[in-house]
Image: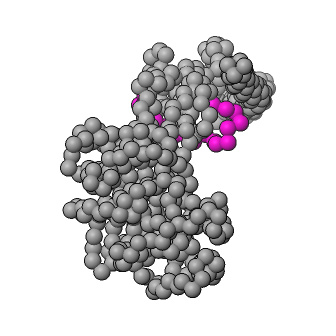
Amino acid sequence: MATHREALQRIISTLANKNDEIQNFIDTLNHTLKGVQDNSSNILSELDEEFDSLYSILDEMKERMVSSIKQEQARKSQELQSQLSQCNNALENSEELLEFATRSLDIKEPEEFSKAARQIKDRVTMASAFRLSLKPKVSDNMTHLMVDFSRERQMLQTLKFLPVPKAPEIDPVECLVADNSVTVAWRMPEEDNKIDHFTLEYRKTNFDGLPRVKDERCWEIIDNIKGTEYTLSGLKFDAKYMNFRVRACNKAVAGEYSDPVTLETKALNFNLDNSSSHLNLKVEDTCVEWDPTGGKGQETKSKGKENKGRSISRSHCSSPYKRSGTPSPKRTSVGSRPPAVRGSRDRFTGESYTVLGDTAIENGQHYWEVKAQKDCKSYSVGVAYKTLGKFDQLGKTNTSWCIHVNNWLQNTFAAKHNNKVKALDVTVPEKIGVFCDFDGGQLSFYDANSKQLLYSFKTKFTQPVLPGFMVWCGGLSLNTGMQVPSAIRTLQKSENGMTGSSSSLN
């Protein structure tokens, strides 16, 4: 019966996953169909604009050419009209002179005839008819303004759509995810010397497989990439996967996108649990700061109900580690526990100025970084079981491991577990990297910048652990969503047997 039930559960799970996959494909098809319609309308509009631009250029050229022909016609007509007018005047004068000369032949008196002959001679000498050029100043030839657009017509007949680059191919084997960076590599299916650059698009997602049309995140764009690979650096891996796609662009147009590729970018992401933090801590998602006046009335009320007559007197900056010989009060039983101010568990109280992460580590290797404010008097960084008591301080029980920095009265830097202390003879770094190998039973602390090992606990975790932090008179800020750095992975191979790991605290 149980076997059949398990088999049916697997079938149901498989069907649900397949239905989800088909629905995502339907969404993709609908999105693509809408894209075809929208893009076709845009392309048709652009085509109209291009042809209208051509028509406009041809109309302007025709107007200029027509104007040139008409100007040439007017110039030649004016020249010929002027020449024609001069000729008509000359002809009229010449005919009048001819008639006068003909009449003069009939004069009988010699003296009068001689006088007429002299007049005729003088008039002939001055006659415009003998000064005219009888060659037209311009010809009727207009061939210099003729056109032949046969070559241009052939060019117009060769008009075609732009050559579009083919879609690149992303090679997942050549892609690399390491140190919160992603290197994406691709190639062209065939050589294309017209490609000017590539455009890479990426987005974060929590879904494996093909990108979802209805994914909640938008594509980010990296443009003008000249090579066939690109590295995105300094990423926060706050999603399980990242989708990538790339397309080639020539001087005129961008080609099709490559088939999308999904790469795993899993890392530990957590915030600080404000619901159970000490009331004297001001907690935001990845920041915690000491607040000596925080929740004073609620804390006093809660203490009064639990321990009547017992009072704890301290100044605003009374170190929780000042009276290290005084044991912390034992946690009260579940039956007598006062109600928490907020959240599903009791708040840390007393001198346990503690806040835990909101995500438990149950397996695998994880890494995060912590930076303290410059004036922070005292702080601890480590991990703890969920069962850490509300009065318990990090490192003072067998359920927590930490390194502790104290800048109050005297400077100390130490590893702590089960109320045992190991002084560390190294400089406190600006930023501390925490590496937790749950399955390997290792908790290591590093200088986050140089990756120098500060200290390493060897143990066997029997319960899920939570990142833990103590802060007094100062503040801490966290970086999460980080992969285990390659340098630390390499160091892990050679750390076994190093003197930095101490079994005396375990």
Residue at image point 57% right, 27% down: 260
In percent of width and height, residue 192 lies at 47, 19
Residue at image point 65% right, 18% down: 160
**Front position in the image: 294 or 499:** 499
In percent of width and height, residue 96 lies at 78, 30
In percent of width and height, residue 153 lies at 66, 15
Q: Quadrant of residue 55?
A: top right
Residue at image point 51% right, 34% down: 264
Q: Can residue 353 be seen in this view?
A: no
Residue span colored magenta: 211-230
Asked if residue 176 is among those painted magenta in the image, a careful observer would answer no
What secondary structure is the magenta-colored segment mainly?
loop
**Front position in the image: 149 or 100:** 149
In percent of width and height, residue 18 lies at 71, 22
Judged left or right of residue 241, residue 88 is right
For residue 231, above or below residue 209: below
